[in-house]
Image (spheres, grey):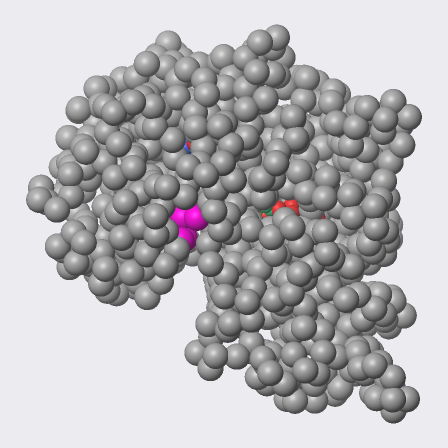
């Protein structure tokens, strides 16, 4: 690995030759060139192929010859790597030794090959048979009080595996089903049902053909959903559609793009400008910026009415569909501009410029991501975005809608098939009738509550279907201590990660097949299904030989765990389900007839099928049957807005172009010009000068939370960066020790990872 550190601004576009080079590098490194890598990539996101294991962005119904992006290719190479973390590796290393290893080094050992148990005498993982693993885990689970066990899911597992997993947890006796979504788009799942009556976005790919305006709030497509760049490029080039971006950082993917699949653009080195307006607002300033835009629309509408010109508001839509508009409009008019400007960190003119373009568009789409959801006021900010759309009837017409860009490839789908700690969101009565059991009706724990439970010892065992929980959550130092106190940790994973190295008093690794691998069962090769962020279900068929002969599929592992801990149930034949995933899909269809009727037939259609989205038809599945304007109480609801005066900075934690969540592919964040390290803090030059910090100097960060807990990350290199004054940025998960567990979005408990109050210390 190149350890030479440099932090020069990157001049190139997103995509282009930089992207092509980066893909080739990782294919080589993972040993998948010249053959397997390219052959497999050819099958990516194709009807007869597999669904990319990276992000959840929509798949085209008529895919291009190469339907993958730079980061999708990295994710594929990461999974089909020829590296193996096998028994010889574990024989050589104690876990105490491996604790000093980086996230990168751990995963770079390659795919796990055997089920393992931690052996306290040698402090090593040792091989056991699958039979032993399930018998031991089953016995331990049986001895525990069901409410003291957590069944976590990371958003990659298929609909089939996820449905089986939630059923197992409920039959075992709890709703303790937190999901990576609790750290991610849970703010969406809380915000949107109240406003438009659906927990998901309302936009389909076809809407790109009809839209007149795109708004981006805190989502970074160039890194986190790069296939979207093709649609963005298309609407910019073909129809000159304006794109207005709100983001504290100037993200290259929102500035300019060279399509690596266009020979013309590659050879001529030409680029497409993406954003037509770029507003570098304060972190957490979105609520204020949106209120400002709403104010401008109201003023424009007053003026239009006075002149007898066409209205700016969609009065007809509001009258027929919406509730709460008058109170909302009144509150908007009262907000003073000085407050809006200071909270947003933008001028009235900037906000008005955005509002004027939006006001002209016949149909607009609003995209958002972690820049909205991971704030104390995240739920409100999403509802304010929905208000802005409702003002002009931008929900339920072609080319318009709200577009939460979800993270993991099946994170949305897992919620659709019952992975939820909220019992009211799962069809418990149906499942009770289907399987003849009495599901628990009390609320389970979400991610933050699971952590609290681990800390106070009410949670005693943790089973993870994928993910790297301990590394993804807040308060790393405190939580790692609590994690070690658990009676048992069980990791169903594909590669070694921190949650396997730091472990409970009993610890098991259950390595599984990845989605790209052929899944052979009793009735033949099986496929699985996933839901993308636009609410479309697709089949995904494994293409390559399993990484090791001993690996089991996720459905098989879940079924074996279920059999080891549950009494036999005449209404549920786990082995038959594993032998034929069609039977799991039949069960899903029976639990969720409105969404999955005829599941097995429809999932075999090459283009998959859509989930129903009433809001698209302007049917509002809210308690009052209306689309609701929800009025924010105040603009400074987010107590973490930058506070320059006190010497405190607001830290944003971000992803690099070389990672997938806690998986670090490499140390080069090409698009931000950071090469050779992830231990950086990006700072405004004035904030640096004020503190006497020079570019490249080593600093420490501490959390300024006022709760007497010392939270510190040492040894960060200060980098002068184009970022608003009063805030700074660092990488997730390296900065997670700074994020207090109690610092989360009101209503959704999503950790407020985009606004951590910190102080910078020099040596
Ligand atoms: N390659 C790759 N793809 C991924 C992932 C990955 O790690 N790597 N992760 C997956 C997952 S699980 C998820 S959830 C998604 C995450 O995808 P995104 O939602 O794009 O998440 P982030 O990169 O964390 O942050 C998004 C942007 O928010 C901006 N931002 C920060 N604070 C604010 C704010 O207060 N307001 C505004 N307007 N913007 C702000 C940041 O500068 C950043 O550009 O991507 C998924 N796809
Ligand atoms: N500070 C800060 N913290 C954050 C965020 C942030 O922006 N800032 N983002 C949050 C978000 S949005 C999310 S979604 C969470 C992510 O939290 P998680 O979803 O828990 O974490 P990942 O890093 O995606 O998990 C990676 C691990 O999954 C395992 N894995 C990979 N593929 C498979 C598979 O096919 N099957 C199984 N069973 N296992 C597999 C591998 O062993 C790998 O090590 O982190 C959250 N934490
Ligand atoms: Mo996520």
x and y percentages locating residue 186 in the rendered image: 49, 58
Please, what is the dominant secondary structure of the magenta stretch?
helix
x and y percentages locating residue 128 in the rendered image: 23, 19
Q: Is residue 561 above or below residue 262?
A: below
Q: Is residue 278 above or below residue 343?
A: above
Q: Is residue 139 above or below residue 708?
A: above
- Judged left or right of residue 266, residue 320 is left
- Judged left or right of residue 457, residue 211 is right
Residue 377 visible at all: no
Identify the residue at horizontal 58%, vertical 44% (top origin): 58
Q: Quadrant of residue 303?
A: bottom right
Residue 264 visible at all: yes
Q: In the rendered view of the protein, which quadrant contains the N terminus? A: top right
Q: Outermost residue, bottom direction? A: 306
**556 or 86, which is in the foreground?**
556
x and y percentages locating residue 653 in the rendered image: 64, 48
Identify the residue at horizontal 89%, vertical 27% (top origin): 269
**533 or 700, which is in the foreground?**
533
x and y percentages locating residue 351 in the rendered image: 83, 68
Number of numbered tags placed on the structure image: 0
Q: Which residues are the magenta region? A: 413-417
415 magenta-colored: yes
């Amino acid at each position: 690995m190149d350890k030479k550190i440099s932090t020069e601004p990157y001049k190139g576009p997103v995509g282009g030759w930089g992207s092509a080079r980066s893909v080739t590098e990782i294919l080589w490194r993972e040993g998948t060139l010249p053959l397997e890598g390219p052959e497999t990539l050819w099958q990516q996101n194709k009807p007869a192929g597999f669904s990319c294991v990276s992000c959840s962005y929509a798949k085209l119904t008529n895919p291009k010859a190469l339907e993958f992006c730079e980061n999708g290719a990295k994710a594929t190479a990461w999974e089909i790597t020829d590296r193996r973390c096998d028994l010889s590796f574990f024989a050589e290393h104690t876990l105490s030794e491996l604790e000093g290893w980086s996230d990168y080094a751990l995963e770079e050992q390659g795919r796990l090959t055997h089920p393992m148990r931690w052996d306290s005498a040698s402090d090593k993982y040792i091989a056991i048979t699958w039979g032993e693993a399930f018998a031991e885990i089953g016995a331990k689970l049986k001895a525990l009080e069901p409410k003291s066990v957590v069944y976590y899911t990371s958003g990659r597992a298929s609909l089939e595996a996820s449905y089986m997993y939630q059923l197992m947890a409920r039959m075992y006796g709890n709703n303790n089903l937190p999901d990576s979504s609790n750290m991610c788009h849970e703010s969406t799942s809380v915000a949107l049902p109240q406003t438009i009556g659906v927990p998901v976005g309302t936009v389909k790919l076809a809407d790109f053909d009809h839209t007149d305006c795109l708004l981006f709030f805190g989502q970074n497509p160039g890194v986190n959903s790069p296939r979207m760049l093709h649609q963005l490029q298309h609407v910019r080039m073909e129809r000159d559609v304006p794109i207005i971006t709100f983001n504290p950082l100037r993200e290259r993917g929102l500035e300019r793009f060279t399509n690596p699949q266009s020979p013309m653009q590659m050879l001529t080195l030409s680029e497409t400008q993406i954003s037509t307006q770029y507003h570098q607002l304060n972190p957490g300033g979105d609520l204020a910026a949106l209120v400002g835009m709403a104010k401008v629309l109201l003023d424009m509408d007053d003026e239009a009415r006075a002149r007898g010109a066409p209205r700016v508001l969609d009065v007809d839509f509001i009258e027929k569909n919406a509730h709460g508009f008058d109170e909302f409009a009144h509150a908007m008019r009262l907000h003073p501009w000085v407050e809006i400007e200071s909270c947003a960190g933008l001028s009235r003119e900037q906000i008005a410029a955005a509002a004027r373009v939006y006001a002209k568009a016949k149909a607009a789409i609003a995209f958002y991501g972690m820049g909205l959801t991971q704030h104390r006021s995240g739920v409100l900010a999403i509802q304010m975005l929905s208000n802005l759309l409702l003002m002009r009837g931008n929900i339920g017409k072609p080319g318009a809608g709200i577009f939460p860009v979800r993270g993991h490839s099946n994170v949305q789908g897992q919620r659709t098939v019952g992975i939820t700690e909220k019992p009211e969101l799962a069809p418990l009565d149906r499942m009770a009738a289907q399987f003849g059991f009495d599901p628990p009706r009390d609320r389970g724990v979400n991610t933050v509550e699971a952590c609290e439970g681990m800390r106070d010892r009410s949670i005693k065992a943790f089973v993870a279907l994928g993910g790297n929980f301990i590394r993804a959550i807040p308060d790393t130092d405190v939580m790692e201590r609590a994690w070690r106190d658990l009676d048992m940790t069980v990791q169903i994973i594909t590669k070694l990660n921190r949650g396997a190295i730091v472990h409970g008093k009993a610890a098991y690794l259950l390595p599984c097949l990845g989605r790209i691998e052929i899944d052979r069962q009793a009735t033949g090769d099986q496929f699985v299904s996933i839901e993308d962020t636009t609410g479309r279900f697709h089949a995904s068929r494994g293409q390559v030989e399993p990484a090791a002969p001993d690996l089991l599929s996720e459905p098989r592992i879940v079924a074996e765990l279920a059999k080891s801990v549950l009494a036999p149930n005449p209404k549920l034949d786990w082995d038959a389900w594993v032998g034929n995933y069609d039977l799991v899909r039949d069960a899903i269809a029976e639990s969720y007839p409105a969404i999955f009727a005829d599941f097995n037939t429809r999932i075999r259609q090459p283009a998959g099928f859509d989930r129903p989205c009433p809001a698209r038809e302007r049917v509002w599945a809210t308690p009052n049957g209306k689309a609701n304007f929800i009025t924010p109480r105040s603009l400074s609801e987010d107590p973490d807005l930058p506070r320059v005066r006190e010497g405190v900075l607001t830290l944003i934690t971000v992803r690099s172009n070389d990672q997938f969540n806690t998986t670090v592919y490499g140390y080069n964040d090409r698009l931000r010009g950071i090469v050779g390290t992830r231990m950086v803090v990006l700072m405004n030059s004035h904030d640096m000068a004020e503190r006497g910090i020079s570019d490249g100097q080593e600093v420490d960060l501490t959390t300024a939370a006022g709760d007497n807990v010392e939270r510190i990350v040492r040894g960060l290199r200060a980098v002068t960066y184009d970022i608003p004054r009063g805030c700074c940025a660092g990488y997730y998960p390296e900065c997670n020790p700074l994020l207090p567990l109690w610092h989360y979005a009101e209503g959704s408990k999503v950790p407020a990872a985009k606004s951590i109050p910190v102080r910078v210390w020099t040596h």
